[in-house]
Amino acid sequence: MRTAFLLLVAVGVLGATASAQTVYQIPFASPGNTIELAVENTSSISTAVGVEAGNIPGWLHFTSTSSRLDAVGPGNQSSAVFTFSVDKTAPVSHQHTLRFTVTASSGQSWTKEITLSVNPPETFELSQNYPNPFNPTTAIPFQLPKEARVRITIFNLLGQEIAALADGLFEPGYHEVVWNAERCSSGMYVYQLEARDGVDHTTVSRKTLVLVK
């Protein structure tokens, strides 16, 4: 799932910073999202325009953070298109404002601010630990579509619980817990995630991992 949206910036008269009025909802862990800035030349002469994206968080990955429009004629429009992906580590349901600086060949500049919010993942998921096999630590990733009380436990192949890695409330989004198996012997183990997001709704998922010493 991807998202795309169009915004208009008029150049020709020096303007103030535009305030973001809309919060754009972006799918969780999504590639190929686009922002299209339509630049309108309201002056009487052609102008080259540069557009630079700024205030970009580490979980947002732009193919390119700059775009140049070589000649925008009087009364005409031209578009600067930015493509980006959203990392799974992005905080969900939190607003973040990007800042696009538009600079004309005359040296005048304008700023357009765009506010984004990443939607929570649509499904619960327990991922394979990494590295696997491991020695002595490994990370166990999981994602939650809504806030849930999470318990993560490790069992041996006899079904005996040997470690509890988490037991508490987790926000929606992507998470990781780390198991240090320094005191355990080599072999295969089972890790289990139990997530309760309501009084009666509990999801349980299990996977295996291998400790090699």
Image (cartoon, grey):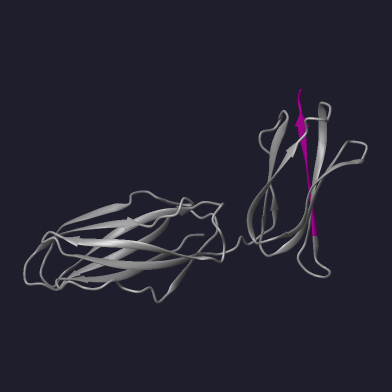
**Among the 4 quarters of the image, the one containing residue 81:** bottom left
Is 117 one of the magenta-colored residues? no
Report whether 21 appears left or right of 143: left
Residue range of the region highlighted in magenta in the rendering: 203-213
Total numbered circles: 0
**Residue 124 x %, y %:** 69, 57
65 over 100 or under it: above or below: above
**Among the 4 quarters of the image, the one containing residue 105:** bottom left
**Residue 193 x %, y %:** 78, 51
- Looking at the image, the residue that sits furthest to the top is 213
- Residue 184 vs residue 126, the one in the foreground: 184
116 over 208 or under it: above or below: below
- Residue 164 vs residue 118, the one in the foreground: 164
- Looking at the image, the residue that sits furthest to the bottom is 21
130 over 55 or under it: above or below: above
Report whether 157 appears left or right of 99: right
Is 204 one of the magenta-colored residues? yes
- Looking at the image, the residue that sits furthest to the left is 45
- Residue 27 vs residue 1, the one in the foreground: 27
User: Which residue is rendered at x = 26% and y = 54% of the image?
Assistant: 67
| Dominant secondary-structure state across the stretch colored magenta | strand
Quadrant holding the C terminus: top right
User: Which residue is rendered at x = 27% and y = 59% of the image?
Assistant: 80
Report whether 175 appears left or right of 76: right
53 over 185 or under it: above or below: below
**Residue 159 x %, y %:** 92, 41
